[in-house]
C-alpha cells in the first residue's frame, strides 16, 4: 500500500512520523489528513514537545496567519532555528486554509533541497479533499501522505482507561471522537459538541468550500439520508426519491464520493470481479463514525435493550466502518436471496464477514458459505455476540465477538496494537 493509502490510529501516526523525522533532513513533506477532532493538532503539539527547541509550530487558522508576510516570517524563523540547533522541524497545522499553500510549500521544499537545509516539514489538513487536490497538483514527488482516522475501540480503551468491552460499546452507541468522550454523560452537551465542532465545520467549511459543490442543500440532504440508513444497501434512485431538492443521479453519486473523501460516509460497492458491475450496483451506506448517526437521529443514543434491531444495525455499521478506517478495501455481496455483510481485502487478508448481534440459525450463514465456496481465497467469519458463537462453531465457521472485532479486527490480525 502506498503512503497515500495509510489510515492509521493516533499512536500509529505518531510513531510513523517520529521515525520519519529521525531520518536525515530534508526529507519528503509529510502531509497528515484526517477527520475533524481526531487529534491532528494534539499530535503536532506532541511532536513539537518531542523535538524540543528544533520545532517550529504554526497554525494556519491563527490570526497571525492572515497578516501580510506570514510565509516569509515563518520561513525565516525555520531557517534561524535550523542554524541555531542544527535542524528544524516545521509543523504547519490546517495548512489547507492558507491561500496557495501547496505551491508555497513546494517552493519552500525546493529551496530547502537546493540549500541542503536540515529541515523536515509536517503539514495537516482536516479534509482529504483540500490536501489531495493541492498536493497532487503542486507537490508531486515531494510528499508522503498519511491519514489519521477515526479512533478504534482499542485506542479509546487505552487512552481513557475504560474496559475494552465498554470501549467497544461506546464506539457503537456514541462513536469515538476523543474530544467528545468527557461529555458522554451529558447528552445535550455531547450532541452539541458533535454538531458544532465536527459535523457543521466538516460540511459547512471543508466540503462546501469546494467549487464542485454547487447545491449545498442537496449535499446536506444526501448526508442526512446516508446517516439514517447505517449499513443499508440503498439505490441512488431511492436516495433521490427521499430528497426534497431533487438532483440528477450523477450529482447524488458525486456527493456521496465527496462525503467519503471528507471521512463522513463510505458508499460501499458490491463485490464483483467485473468492475462495470461494481459501479452499476446500489451502494451500501456506512457512516464512518457512529457519533454522526446518533447526532442525526431524533431518537438519540440507542438503547440495546429497548431497540435491539437498531442496535444491531449500528454494530454492523461500526464493524464495517472499522474495516474502512483501518485501510481495508470493503465491499458487500448480494445475489438474491443470498447476501454477505462485508467482503474485506487488504492488510488483514481476505475475509467474508457476516455480522449477527442476535440469535441466528446455521441456515442464516448460507450466503456466507456460498460466497466463500465461489471465491476460494476468502475466509468466512461470523461477528456476533458471545452467546451466539456456538451456532457458528456447529457450522464449522470461525467466529469472534463484535467487541473483539472492534478492538482488534479479525482473528490473528491485531490491527490496533499500540
Image (tube, rainbow, N blue to C red):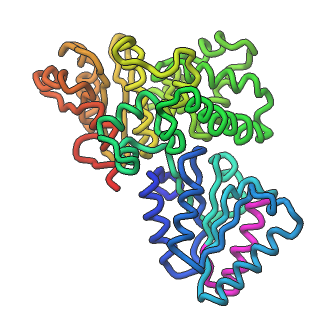
Quick check: 226 above or below 326?
Answer: above
- Magenta residues? 100-120
Task: Find residue 265 and report its image quarter.
Answer: top right
Residue 106 lies within the magenta run? yes
Quick check: 293 above or below 260?
Answer: above
Whether residue 257 is visible here, answered yes or no, is no
Horizontal and vertical percent position of residue 326: 42, 45
Residue at the spot x=45%, y=23% of the render? 231
368 vs 388, nearest the viewer: 388
Q: Name the residue furthest front.
A: 186
Left or right placement of residue 195 versus residue 233 in this view: right
Q: Name the residue furthest left.
A: 394
Magenta stretch: dominant SS? Answer: helix
Whether residue 39 is visible here, answered yes or no, is yes
Left or right placement of residue 94 versus residue 156 in this view: right
Left or right placement of residue 34 versus residue 336 in this view: right
Residue 229 lies within the magenta run? no
Quick check: 334 above or below 176?
Answer: above
Horizontal and vertical percent position of residue 148: 51, 51
Residue at the spot x=64%, y=27% of the render? 253
| Screen quadrant of the C terminus | bottom left
Horizontal and vertical percent position of residue 295: 56, 25
275 vs 25, nearest the viewer: 25
Residue at the spot x=18%, y=16% of the render? 362
Horizontal and vertical percent position of residue 69: 86, 70
| Screen quadrant of the N terminus | bottom left
Residue at the spot x=22%, y=46% of the render? 412
The total of numbered circles placed on residues is 0
Amino acid at each position: 500500500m502506498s503512503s497515500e493509502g495509510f489510515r492509521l490510529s493516533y499512536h500509529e501516526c505518531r510513531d510513523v512520523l517520529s521515525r520519519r523525522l529521525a531520518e536525515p533532513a530534508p526529507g519528503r513533506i509529510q502531509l497528515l489528513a484526517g477527520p475533524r477532532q481526531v487529534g491532528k493538532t494534539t499530535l503536532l503539539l506532541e511532536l513539537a514537545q518531542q523535538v524540543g527547541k528544533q520545532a517550529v509550530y504554526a497554525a494556519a487558522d491563527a490570526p497571525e496567519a492572515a497578516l501580510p508576510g506570514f510565509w516569509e516570517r515563518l520561513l525565516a524563523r525555520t531557517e534561524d532555528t535550523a542554524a541555531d540547533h542544527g535542524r528544524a522541524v516545521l509543523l504547519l497545522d490546517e495548512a489547507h486554509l492558507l491561500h496557495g499553500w501547496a505551491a508555497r510549500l513546494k517552493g519552500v521544499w525546493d529551496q530547502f533541497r537546493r540549500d541542503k537545509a536540515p529541515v523536515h516539514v509536517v503539514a495537516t489538513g482536516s479534509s482529504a479533499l483540500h490536501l489531495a487536490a493541492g498536493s497532487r497538483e503542486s507537490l508531486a514527488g515531494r510528499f508522503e501522505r498519511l491519514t489519521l482516522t477515526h479512533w478504534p475501540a482499542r485506542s479509546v480503551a487505552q487512552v481513557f482507561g475504560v474496559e475494552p468491552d465498554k470501549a467497544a460499546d461506546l464506539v457503537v452507541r456514541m462513536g469515538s471522537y476523543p474530544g467528545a468522550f468527557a461529555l458522554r454523560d451529558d447528552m445535550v452537551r455531547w450532541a452539541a459538541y458533535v454538531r458544532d465542532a465536527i459535523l457543521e465545520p466538516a460540511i459547512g467549511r471543508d466540503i462546501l468550500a469546494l467549487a464542485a459543490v454547487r447545491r449545498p442543500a442537496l449535499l446536506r440532504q444526501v448526508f442526512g439520508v446516508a446517516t439514517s440508513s447505517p449499513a443499508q444497501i440503498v439505490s441512488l434512485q431511492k436516495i433521490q426519491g427521499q430528497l426534497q431538492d431533487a438532483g440528477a443521479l450523477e450529482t447524488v453519486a458525486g456527493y456521496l464520493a465527496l462525503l467519503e473523501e471528507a471521512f463522513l460516509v463510505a458508499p460501499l460497492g458490491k463485490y464483483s470481479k467485473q468492475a462495470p458491475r461494481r459501479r452499476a450496483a446500489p451502494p451500501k451506506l456506512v457512516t464512518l463514525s457512529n457519533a454522526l448517526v446518533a447526532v442525526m437521529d431524533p431518537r438519540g443514543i440507542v438503547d440495546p435493550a429497548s431497540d435491539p434491531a437498531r442496535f444491531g444495525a449500528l454494530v454492523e455499521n461500526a464493524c464495517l466502518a472499522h474495516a474502512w478506517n483501518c485501510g481495508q478495501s470493503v465491499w458487500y455481496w448480494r445475489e438474491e436471496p443470498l447476501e454477505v455483510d462485508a467482503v474485506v481485502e487488504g492488510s488483514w487478508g481476505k475475509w467474508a464477514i457476516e455480522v449477527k448481534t442476535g440469535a441466528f440459525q446455521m441456515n442464516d450463514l448460507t450466503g456466507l458459505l456460498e460466497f466463500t465456496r465461489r471465491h476460494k481465497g476468502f475466509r468466512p467469519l461470523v461477528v456476533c455476540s458471545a452467546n451466539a458463537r456456538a451456532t457458528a462453531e456447529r457450522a464449522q465457521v470461525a467466529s469472534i465477538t463484535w467487541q473483539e472485532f472492534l478492538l482488534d479486527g479479525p482473528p490473528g490480525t491485531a490491527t490496533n496494537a499500540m
